[in-house]
Amino acid sequence: MSKELGFSNQDIQSNQFLEIITGNSIIENSKPFAMCYAGHQFGNWAGQLGDGRAINLGEIKNWALQLKGAGPTPYSRTADGLAVLRSSVREYLCSEAMHHLGVPTTRALSLSLTGDQVLRDVMYNGNSAYEKGAIVSRVAKSFLRFGNFEIFAARNDLKNLKILTDYTILHHFSHLGNPCKEVYLKFFQEVTNKTLEMIVHWQRVGFVHGVMNTDNMSILGLTIDYGPYGWLEGFDLGWTPNTTDKKHKRYRYGNQPTIGLWNLYQLANALYPLIDEAAPLEEILERYQRDFKTESLHMMRSKLGLTLAKKNDLLLIESLEKNLQASETDMIIFFRKLSDFKKEFPEQGIKLVENAFYKIDEIHDNLLNNWQQWFSEYAKRLKEEPIPFSERQKKMNKVNPKYVLRNYMAQLAIDKVETNDSSLIEELYQILKKPYEEQPEFEHWFAKRPEWARHKVGCSMLSCSS
Ligand code: AMP
Ligand code: MG
């Protein structure tokens, strides 16, 4: 990221750089600011929020630079404006990992300790404790959120709603043309497409954002605000890492596409005063649902190495998902191993992926039959494909990552850095830069979640406390 911004190695080792990314001094002639936005949180209107702990330093080569956790802003409300090391490590590693996975995301430039002690109640159960404070400097073309548009609409401040929307179009969607009613609609269509594309990527790699509130939805369709996110281990459409959402599981893996749409409805409402016609907005929202089905099918075909579109593919995919879920199957290992599958030997399928099963002893009778049946259907389907084994394998390995930031991996890096040893952060950072490559020296990270991490805070259970 530093190279992209034009910094040399010398620059990033300078004291001046350190002072800037830790918020001790500001870039010459710049005017740092925090943004005001609103949001719908967990399905309810939450009113005004804003950058409570993010400070925009300015732009470098059209990239906006923010500090997260550098202290109070006018929007901190009753909170401290700080961030703890634990959540900063998670944001730093995961946002970079996502970038290298090919998922649209904000980036991370640096991670630093502040020397502050920050009080947090990790599980909201009355056990507050001091933790180390940290700052992530993060980078994006824009940090605007759906909530930035919602705040003006809610205040009926149409003048500023128009100024903001026109600004966004001129700076980030200029190919759409000069702002006018038609262009506002095109803008909404494009934000819809980008949001859809981002969520299809999440589903592909097994990422669960955890807090898809409208204030956490980027207008550029970037994954933003890494909080209690998590990675699927056992494939489970009902899984959410966020314990704050334990009861309704609004933001569970399988619900992310629907929530994306729900959030787009809120954005449509916010933009409505500029357009003054509901039908074309509704049409775009309806199209999202159709497009999602198409794009999702396309994505799942690619995970299975299918290049042709055949009528029964959806059935094949649905029965696979049923099996994956019924047998607690590690999503990453399963799809990665599947690229070794040979259509001539369907009976070897189970053996090939057995490492992906968390409870191999439970795979018998019906479940075993279902799997055997699935592998023979899959083998039959592969026989219709024009590409040879080696080409399919190559294609599959480009969409099915070998290395992701498993929940327990982040936690191990956090535990280590708490003892002033950042070596694991560095190791994971290097691995996650090449998630689709084999990297035999790191094969030990291509493994199921260890049992100790199954119910551990920070691994399977995360809260919004950060
Ligand atoms: P989040 O759930 O992290 O997206 O945060 C929701 C809102 O709370 C945003 O407006 C944040 O800026 C604000 N917020 C979260 N943590 C803090 C904090 N420690 N200090 C100030 N504001 C915060
Ligand atoms: Mg947020």
Image (cartoon, rainbow, N blue to C red):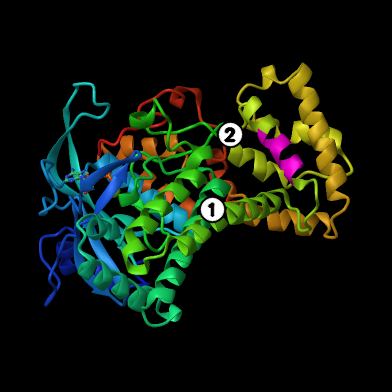
- Which of the two discs, 1 and 2, labels the residue nearer the N terminus? 1
Q: Is residue 208 left or right of residue 351?
A: left
**Residue 316 falls within the magenta-colored stretch:** yes
**Residue type indicated by callout 2:** Phe
Q: Percent x, y for residue 175?
A: 45, 80
- Whether 235 is among the magenta residues is no
Q: Quadrant of residue 370?
A: top right
Name the residue: 45% across, 23% down.
452
- Residue sitting at 44 percent across and 69 percent down? 185
Residue behind mark 2 = 235
Q: Is residue 61 above or below residue 148?
A: below
Residue under circle 1? Answer: 201
For the residue carrying disc 2, how many other residues have a C-alpha within 10 Å: few (<14), some (14-19), or many (20+)? many
Q: In terms of secondary structure, where does tag 1 sit? A: helix
Judged by its main secondary structure, the magenta piece is: helix
Q: Which residues are magenta?
A: 314-321
